[in-house]
Image (cartoon, rainbow, N blue to C red):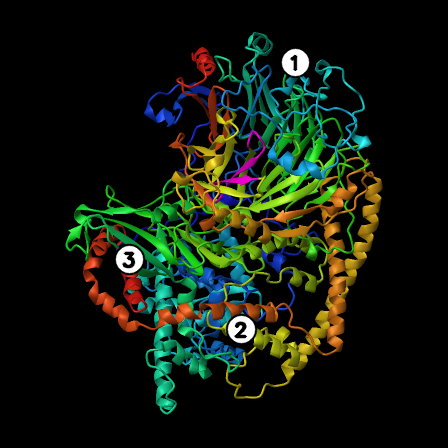
Amino acid sequence: MFAIPPPPRYPTNNGLITATLETANTLTHREGPEYTFQAGEGTYILRDDLQLATPPPHPSEAPVINPNPLATSVVPPTSGVKLSLVSLNPKQINHDLYKAPTATSSLKENKEPEKEPRISIETTSDISNPAISINGSNKSSTVRAFGEGNAALSPVISRGDGLKRRKPKNNIIKSNSSFVSRVIPHEGLVKKLVERDPGGTFAFANINRAFQWLDLSSSSKQDPMTKILFTKAHMLCHDVNPLTKHPTHMDVVMGSSASDIIWYEPMSQKYARINKNGIINSSAVAKIRWIPGSENHFLAAHMDGTLVVYDKEKEDAPFVSEELVDEGISIEDEEQSTLVITKSVNSSNQKANPVACWKISNQAITDFAFSPDSKHLAVVGDDGCLRIIDYLQERLTDIYSSYYGAFTCVCWSPDGKYVLTGGQDDLVSIWSLHERQIIARCHGHDSWVAAVAFDPWRCDDRNYRFGSVGEDCKLLLWDFSVGMLHRPKGATARTRGSISQQSGSLLRQRTESASVINRIRSDSNRTGSIQQDIVDESEFINHPVEPRARTAQLPPVMSKKIDDHPLSGLAFEQDCIITSCVEGHVRTWDRPREGPNSSQVDLSEKKRP
Amino acid sequence: MTSFFGKLKSQNATGPAVGTTPAKKDPNAPLPTPLERMLMNAGPIRNDGSDKFFGMENFGNTCYCNSILQCLYYSVPFRDHVLSYPKRSTPESVAHAQAHAPPRIPPLQQNGTAKKPLGPSSARSAGTPPQQQKPEDKDSPEYKKKQALLAGPILNMSYENSREYEMPETLFTSLKDLFEAVVVNQSRMGVISPSRFLETLRRENEMFRSAMHQDAHEFLNLLLNTVVENIEDHDRKVIAQRKAEQPLRGVEDDGDLSKTESESGTVSFPPILPTPTTSSPTRWLHELFEGTLTSETRCLTCENVSQRDEPFLDLSVDLEQHSSVTACLRRFSEEEMLCERNKFHCDNCGGLQEAEKRMKIKRLPKILALHLKRFKYTEDLQRLQKLFHKVVYPYHLRLFNTTDDAEDPDRLYELYAVVVHIGGGPYHGHYVAVIKTQDRGWLLFDDEMVEPVDKTFVRNFFGDRPGLACAYVLFYQETTFEAVQKEQRMEGKRRASQDLTSGLAVPPRQSAELHQVQTVTPMGSPGSPSDATYYATLDHAVTAPPEFTTNGHVESPRSPPPPTVRPPSPVLQSKRERVKEEKAHEKARRAAEKQAEKDRQEVEKQRRKVLAAKLTEAQKRQEAELKAALEASKASKAEEDKRHALERSQTVHANGSGSGSSGFDRFKRTKSLRFGSLNKKEKPQLDSSEENVASPDAMTPEKEKDKDKDKEKEKDRRNRFSIRKKSFGMLP
């Protein structure tokens, strides 16, 4: 009998890791039909492919590649390349297509009457449209700023102008922290900063244990302005504060797999470490965002299901939940879906971080997004729930559930009427906050969705364009218009328009079937606020999953495999679409030349090398 | 080989266990294994086998068998059915059979080929270094397996007990023997040595006789088919017996198998059973694993659509790089053209025509076994090759490819088990199973070794990680949205309680409570053996509470009264044990309370020190523990009080052995819902054969297609075909 020699039960080596690790980014230009894609408005062409170098492992952290695939040690989370784009002096956005650039959303119309008009003590800039409020000039707002009612949070020093922004304390280049391994600034950094196009876009990108500051408008954009190598931690998310950006100052925050948060000012190369060694929350940071209109406060989503508001200026202090263990409510009764305020923004104790802390789930949070009107927060997580939170009042308003599996990403439409989610059900779902229900499920991905984004340059008050990228290496573009939204599944696109009788009754049915659950309040030592009684009455709606047969389906207008690796990031710019993948390819796709907007053409032509 | 395991060293050293913190006491004592740590203070043993965690001995490349058996064991309805069909045996009979079992050949002597039927030296013997030249790596799987065998107890399954079940020895009875032995055993962990099962398997199937690497999916397919056969045989025999015994009853209808079956309930069902019209107990396996595929074929000439139903026990899906299971299933149902060599014979217009065909799921199974076709035939190499595509699978699933008239098309499934193939090709490698147990989270079953793992561990086998380990068979089971939400809530709590177990003494009851099964069971058994189990449990709980703690097994009322009267001694002894246990509980509770009190003060102190210098890592952990301890002690107090009150009134409630009567109601409801469809399915055995005869033409292109497919996998054909053959008997 022919006998094959017994092979090892556990493979000794793996043939899969063969990629050599480059240390320098490379920029390549590719041409050919596979590097273009076609949409209704024309052909998108790959401008260039920037390959970010995956750094070799830190020498002291020997490559921990366990040959045993069954090793049960937990691998810290990592993330594919994500981009934070910022333009210091952007040209005014002329929405040729987007005709209603108003923050007066349906949401506002819907909910505003219930609320008392608030007397705002301090006018804070409303950055519902961040591009407009760069200079902090648009200070007309009825929207209350976050934490405004709390005297303990009112700014101590009023800064005259943006020129004297407070910088972090430590120099990152001279740092001897064991957290930061090495910082490599560009040798001609100062010169580069002076000479560059002031309207050009900076990008901040994470790859493995590296964090790179790139100038996308530069002709040699593959050379990072600065590259930071961390010893062990991977940066999973980052954000630039649009309020404080200035040619001499940028506030960047990033959240790491080690739970530490870095506040980084790239121009002066200063940094500060927040939540050091996880003193406040020891789980990794999945998503981080500056709170709209706030200079100092940012929100971090930790992977234990907690949202924490930090102040970049404040010191860390060990965090003890301020939530009183209420005898009346044992854990058994606790609804999974509640928002438990372990520290309220109204807490009088605001000497140290955190500013506020909300436990919303037992499962990891994967993404969140602020509404354009800066009042609501859409949070998604591994528990397959989309939560709409009125973060100013720290109140949960709605919970929607995925068809199945976790949600991975979320974003708001530019007018704040719709929320998009992508998830492990391979679907992009459109949710209407006005109707408080799902609008459509978008079928088209062959694997999990990794990122969704609206294209504000191709949205107007009735038609919306958005894109999505996924693990299937595909970019999909979608169009939906208000008219076609309510068609039931049976009807095809031909019968667009009228809201049928059936869908009307469905709506009612949905609202009735939705269970209304009283929120369990936690009494914390908050300072007495005017909103207290409103909060008390608050309740949220837990929406059940809609069956497939009753939900509209939307097909993509464009679907194309645009990379060889699973994609992780997507951004729409005025002249291009930028995608990024888990292996470090950042691809820029020029918008079609024969677009209706001639200025776009000019712009893209100018940049074409 | 050895050097490889040497390399493993120090990798795991930092994190020995997932989700648990290392025990602090007794640095000299051997550290408890992660599993032991998890099961500390687990409370009394249940009698349904849901809290047993046994590894399985490998007899040389029998990991395919071990991993599949584990997956089946942890399917709650499957286990319940196997245990209760045709009836549960008494612990005495199991003990009796065990006493007469041939001795087991100890593992260390197994290196020779004597034990193995045919094979040359096996992977196992090659994998175990013969001499211990250096201090052994305590984190290597081989070491852990050896330790598991040393720790025992080893259930020597070299006996068979089929006479007890009034059945001939078959694969089913061997399987039942295994399950029974585990459930009856006093220990929570150990190793099963399934020698007799393998003997039976090899006796009946030539394919598995060699000691070579086998395909786990093929084994699953064969096992399910054989079990169906065994059960049907037995039922036929019982019916025949019934008829012979009661010729005058005359109620029986020959055609209606189900009715006859349940009327003969004395054997398989307790008299409590509500109505005799329940579905036939034979059908339980079908009810769990079987679904119906409809192939719709549209003739492109006459536009006539013909449909054909086909039952399936599992779905084999083709894979593509960077896709999801959802997409694979969707592709499975995509339209395909039947043309050229593969034309369709249209009954309407006659002759071979071009046609469009698509397969949709008409009836969804309760347990969806998904076989990812990782082994693909490549023309160039003339052999099967393993595909290392990245195929992601979510924890939950719904099917998109259902027919419009499918019942419950939005049925929600949850992933409960993954069979992982490790290795570069189809002809060698290793199988392990990663399984979500009812109330203990996810566990890794690697032959003899059982280890708790983090939930995220399940996601290591998409195929994109180094190490050649890929998911090969996925088991999804029916669940509900509410159950999922409840479970997510429990997960957070469990995490907290696991932290506790390492540090503070958790009152066992509390811990048991935390882990108590919360799953809503739409998984409901079609026949009601599990209902019976619940009844039995409750019955017994009132009359003789100690039995639970003594043998962890309850005779169901349906089993015939044991021939001999139970000696009273075990009861007495058990009472003593119970008292002892209670003292322990009390002690633990007090300790926890004391600790909690201390903790409370400390919390206060810490609050005052909010601005004080940074806490170290250890302190932080402690803090978390404190909070949990607070809650734990509170809950345990209430629990304790309740229990005392109950004890005084002599009504001890059945501890942690199921969800009681509410669960029963649920079962009943599901069952009654299903009658209609069941009976319809049940009846027309004749019709199906008719159809079989009537539509051979319609079949031909299918068959041709099959042939094409079968080239890919020759062995597969036999199995697939056998399902089909059998399935004709069940077609409506």
Give the amino acid type for the residue marked by disc 2 in the picture. Answer: Asp
Tell me the subunit letter for badge 3: B
**Which residue sits at x=66%, y=16%?**
A135
Q: Secondary structure at mark 2?
A: helix
| Relative image position of residue B281 (x, y in whole percent) | 42, 74
Q: Which residue is mark 2?
A: B531
Q: Is A276 or A345 nearer to us in this picture?
A: A345
Q: Is B409 or B378 nearer to us in this picture?
A: B409
Tell me the subunit letter for badge 1: A
The quarter in which the C terminus of chain A is drawn is top left
Q: Which residue is mark 1?
A: A248
Question: Alpha carbon of mark 1 to alpha carbon of mark 2: how far?
Answer: 73 Å
Q: Is residue A209 magenta?
A: no
Q: Which residues are magenta?
A: A413-432
Q: Is residue A423 magenta?
A: yes
| Relative image position of residue B325 (x, y in whole percent) | 42, 47
Q: Secondary structure at mark 1?
A: loop
Give the amino acid type for the residue marked by disc 1 in the picture. Answer: Thr
| Relative image position of residue B630 (x, y in whole percent) | 76, 54
Q: Is B226 or B8 nearer to us in this picture?
A: B226
**Which residue sits at x=35%, y=90%?**
B247
Magenta stretch: helix, strand or loop mostly: strand
Is disc 2 on the same chain as disc 1? Answer: no
Residue B307: which numbered mark, if any? 3
Give the amino acid type for the residue marked by disc 3 in the picture. Answer: Gln
The quarter in which the N terminus of chain A is drawn is bottom left
Is disc 3 on the same chain as disc 1? Answer: no
